[in-house]
């Protein structure tokens, strides 16, 4: 088979945008392909904005947004969505918190009402707060405390790499902090961060733009304006010396290791950032990738391996500072130094020797397919558009990314590989604490 | 719903789902091929399902290693060359097994379909199972099994399967490490020859492709996959006998993993729509009784849910709730209360309508993507159903009455007919559990 490069498709989506008088930024993206719509509201506050003593608060607050409003009692929100044939969720990230639903298109106005309603006046009571603290603690138990590798490395590596509280702290939260949260804390958090002017509303799918904009005005237009908080930066200098930490996971039967390097600011310099996105895939995507070929199939020193951008695994929804991560699980008999040594060798080989013929083209093709798959569902496209609009003022990037990836130059990927040196690296070693 | 309906906008008239056309061909080899054109993005999704059950105790071990090494090289190409060929067209191929089947899932840029089929044909007809690659994958699988068996969810899954199925092959869904360690390349080649058969298998393609041309391409690419043989049938499921709560000790666990299982209506059972709705009202979605009770009232758990799993030999109910250690017995009490309530009292008309709309709406959502439609069609074919089911099932859901739900709830959700497994800190949870039921050590 000849190594001919395939043409990389890049869809273009029609996007209409407006800003309401109270500051809500609105994006509407019609697509009549299927009778489905999605609605997403993104608030520009995340884990990094939590105050000291309130770790986990952004996530706890996300739960509270489902507990009813001045108009609707507890449980009503998700019943209205599900009884309309839809699904819903919310999620808390380093730099934002989102709420979303996807439904048959005949429920569009209902969905807009539900989001406007809780932007206006969520109902937060002592009872619902106590209940959701308990629920969040069970969430943390099921995902972290009762599960081997549960905090690895998304919660355990940031404090190795970063020094400041916003970047380093545990975003799921300490139980002491969670249990000391009050209704007043929630009210002031809402007042400050859930101002209309701090939100992006994205609506996509089977809709008419003008009708939709009228509905948006109906359900969001009269929410009183509040000043949007100044969005803080959370800068930290790059590492000037390697960092290393070791933690014992009492539930884990076998060891693991994670490595991270700072990468360029994804917002300020997208062109400098994209080569790292490509590099992560060159290193770890599929059996033809550099590190899998060498370490999984060749040396057989690791049992699994992954590489990605952003501690929460999404390259395109984080602001600076962020990182490229590599993580591997390896047998106890293989020393961690051997694992790290092989990674270093392969990075040097790439930095010195460049890419193989056809290697860059096939990796780009795979990234493009992956991105297209992400935006195929109306909901996936809505979420990506909302992120892009909130952080970059450009929802259209949801369709344009494959073309931008296709334009990344080989020399930039090689230069990026040369930056992943031991001197700039944070390493977290996970030692198994469970009996063999 | 008791909120002020006056303020909540009503639903408008639903827009009809776009009909889709299924192009179908059964090749001379017996392979059944379905193609659906979906053009939202220029990709194509592929699912090849091969019946792959086995009665031998070592079968799941062999099937798992085979699945991990199917793409590890052919008589023409190395493992890396297989991966390169697929990646060049933006593609990926993955292989997995369970107790019923082997499934090759893949996708690629739509222009890469010929390449994807070419590679697929090559691994089906010429997978080499090189000794060195088999040894590597076998060792990796052993490590992964060790990690998997440290996960409480996996421990609970195995305990429930064992409790429900005893010696049936379904109890061995996750292979035993000892059996995996003994698997040889010769066994894999033999298993491939005798069991990787086009007859009885299905290939589903959904994407931005021309259906007739895609069928022709499949026929041209896969006509050489012509092994002949007979798939093994799955033994009948044993009757699930109720009994004591099985308690599996996980010292110092901060949560208990409660699992409740039992038989369920098959997807082709005329009563399935009513059973599906009964389960939704009980614990099948977020707006269910169990979520309201255990999570939103009591804060015992994050995400309790009950699903209906469809396997070839029969469908099963699978309830999962991971609860704080200190409330293990109270949580089980509430689960049994909600089971008993739905088995003995009629559901409210609103509850039924909400569940019905959810079932209809989410079926449309889940089949609105290329990947979702490809997976759903594959599952339907495996249940002996066809694409028409997607149109007919919502109609049947629409006709289900409160009485129908009550009958199916009494038949399948009665707590006296179900089995319970708890994985947790036995010393901490046994005393209170023993006040509810007999408890045996797992």
Image (cartoon, coloured by chain):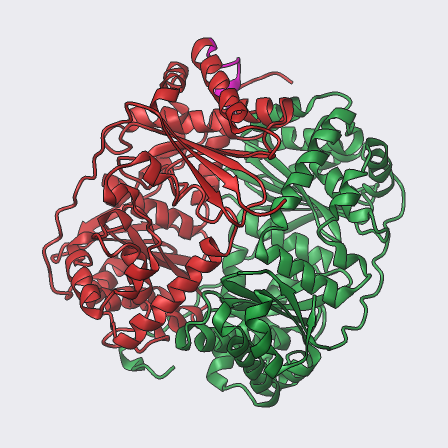
Chain colours: A red, B green
Whether residue A250 is visible to the viewer of this picture, yes or no, is yes
Look at the picture and state if A328 lies above or below A90: above
Residue visible at 26% across and 35% down in the picture: A320
Classify the position of the C terminus of chain A by image quarter. Answer: top right
Q: Is A361 in the magenta?
A: yes
- Picture coordinates of residue A28, whole percent (x, y): 29, 51
Dividing the picture into quadrants, the one containing residue A266 is top left
Dividing the picture into quadrants, the one containing residue B279 is bottom right
Look at the picture and state if B170 lies above or below B200: below
* Near-viewer residue (A46 or A137): A137
**Which residues, given as a range, are shown in magenta?**
A353-363
Furthest residue toward right:
B229
In-image side of A379 versus A3 (left or right): left
- Picture coordinates of residue B27, whole percent (x, y): 79, 42
Look at the picture and state if A283 lies above or below A381: above
Classify the position of the N terminus of chain A by image quarter. Answer: top right
- Picture coordinates of residue B368, whole percent (x, y): 51, 54
In-image side of A160 versus B50 (left or right): left
Residue visible at 29% across and 42% down in the picture: A168
Q: Is A326 in the magenta?
A: no
In-image side of B426 versus A405 (left or right): right
Whether residue A40 is visible to the viewer of this picture, yes or no, is no
In-image side of B162 versus A205 (left or right): right
Residue visible at 65% across and 39% down in the picture: B143
Dividing the picture into quadrants, the one containing residue B5 is bottom left
Residue visible at 22% across and 68% down in the picture: A182
């Amino acid at each position: 088979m000849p190594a001919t490069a395939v043409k990389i498709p890049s869809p273009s989506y029609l996007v209409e945008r407006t800003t309401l008088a109270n500051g809500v930024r609105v994006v509407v993206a019609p697509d009549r392909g299927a009778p489905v719509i999605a609605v997403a509201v993104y608030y520009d506050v995340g884990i990094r904005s939590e105050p000291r003593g309130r770790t986990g608060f952004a996530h706890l607050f996300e739960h509270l947004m489902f507990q009813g409003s001045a108009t609707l009692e507890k449980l009503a929100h998700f019943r209205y969505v599900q009884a309309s044939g839809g699904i819903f969720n919310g999620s808390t990230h380093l730099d934002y918190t989102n709420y979303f639903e996807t439904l048959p298109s005949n429920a569009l106005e209902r969905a807009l009402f539900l989001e406007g309603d809780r932007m206006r006046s969520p109902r937060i009571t002592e009872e619902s707060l106590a209940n959701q603290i308990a629920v969040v603690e069970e969430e943390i138990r099921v995902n972290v405390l009762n599960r081997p590798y549960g905090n690895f490395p998304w919660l355990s590596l940031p404090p190795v790499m970063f020094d400041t509280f916003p970047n380093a702290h545990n975003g799921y939260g300490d139980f002491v902090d969670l249990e000391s949260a009050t209704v007043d804390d929630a009210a002031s958090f809402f007042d400050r961060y859930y101002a209309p002017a701090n939100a992006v509303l994205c609506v996509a799918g089977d809709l008419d733009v003008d009708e939709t904009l009228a509905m948006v005005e109906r359900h969001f237009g009269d929410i009183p304006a509040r000043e949007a908080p100044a969005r803080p930066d959370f800068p930290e200098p790059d590492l000037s010396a390697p960092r290393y930490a070791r933690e014992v996971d009492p539930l884990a039967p076998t060891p693991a290791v994670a490595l991270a390097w700072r990468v360029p600011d994804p917002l300020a310099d997208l062109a400098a950032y994209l080569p790292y996105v490509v590099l992560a895939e060159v290193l770890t995507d599929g059996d033809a990738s550099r590190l899998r070929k060498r370490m999984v199939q060749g040396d057989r020193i690791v049992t699994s391996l992954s590489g990605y951008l952003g501690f929460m695994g999404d390259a395109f929804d984080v602001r600076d500072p962020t990182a490229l991560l590599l993580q591997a699980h390896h047998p106890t008999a293989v020393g961690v130094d051997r694992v790290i040594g092989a990674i270093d060798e392969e990075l040097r080989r790439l930095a010195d020797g460049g890419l193989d013929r056809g290697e860059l083209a096939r990796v780009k093709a795979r990234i493009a397919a992956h991105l297209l798959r992400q935006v195929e569902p109306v909901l996936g496209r809505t979420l990506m558009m909302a992120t892009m609009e909130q952080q970059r003022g450009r929802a259209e990037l949801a369709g344009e990314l494959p073309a931008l990836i296709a334009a990344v130059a080989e020399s930039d990927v090689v230069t990026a590989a040369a930056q992943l040196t031991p001197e700039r690296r944070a390493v977290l070693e996970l030692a198994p604490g469970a009996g063999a | 719903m008791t909120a002020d309906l006056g303020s909540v906008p009503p639903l408008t008239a639903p827009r009809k789902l776009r009909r889709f056309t299924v192009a179908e061909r059964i090749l001379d080899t017996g392979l059944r091929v379905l193609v659906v054109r979906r053009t939202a993005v220029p990709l194509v999704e592929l699912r090849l399902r091969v019946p792959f059950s086995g009665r031998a105790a070592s079968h799941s071990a062999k099937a798992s290693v085979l699945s991990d090494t199917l793409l590890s090289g052919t008589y023409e190409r190395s493992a890396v060359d297989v991966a390169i060929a697929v990646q060049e067209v933006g593609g990926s191929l993955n292989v997995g097994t369970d107790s019923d089947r082997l499934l090759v899932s893949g996708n690629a840029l739509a222009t890469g379909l010929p390449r994807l089929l070419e590679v697929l044909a090559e691994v089906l007809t010429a997978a080499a199972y090189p000794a060195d690659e088999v040894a590597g994958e076998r060792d990796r699988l052993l490590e992964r099994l060790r990690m998997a068996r440290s996960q409480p969810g996996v421990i609970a899954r195995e305990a429930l399967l064992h409790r429900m199925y005893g010696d049936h092959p379904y109890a061995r869904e996750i292979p035993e490490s000892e059996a995996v360690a003994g698997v040889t390349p010769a066994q894999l080649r033999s298993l491939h020859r005798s069991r990787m058969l086009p007859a009885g298998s299905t290939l589903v393609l959904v994407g931005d492709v021309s259906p007739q041309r895609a069928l022709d391409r499949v026929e041209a690419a896969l006509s050489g996959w012509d092994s002949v043989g007979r798939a093994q049938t799955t033994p009948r499921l044993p009757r699930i006998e109720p009994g004591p709560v099985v308690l599996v000790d996980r010292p110092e666990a901060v949560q208990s993993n409660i699992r409740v299982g039992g038989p369920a209506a098959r997807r082709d059972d005329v009563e399935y729509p009513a059973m599906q709705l009964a389960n939704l009202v009980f614990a099948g979605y977020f707006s269910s009784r169990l979520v309201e009770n255990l999570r939103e009232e009591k804060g015992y758990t994050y995400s309790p849910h009950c699903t209906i799993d469809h396997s070839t030999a029969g469908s099963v109910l699978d309830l999962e709730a991971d609860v704080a250690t200190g409330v293990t017995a109270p949580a089980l009490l509430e689960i049994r209360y909600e089971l008993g309530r739905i088995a003995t009292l009629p559901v409210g008309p609103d509850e039924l309508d909400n569940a019905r709309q959810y079932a209809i709406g989410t079926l449309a959502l889940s089949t609105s993507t290329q990947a979702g439609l490809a997976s759903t069609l594959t599952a339907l074919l495996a249940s002996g159903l066809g694409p028409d089911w997607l149109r007919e099932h919502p109609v049947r859901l629409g006709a289900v009455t409160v009485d129908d739900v009550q009958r199916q709830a009494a038949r399948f959700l009665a707590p006296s007919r179900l089995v319970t497994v708890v994985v947790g800190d036995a010393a901490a949870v046994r005393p209170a559990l023993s006040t509810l039921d007999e408890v045996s050590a797992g």
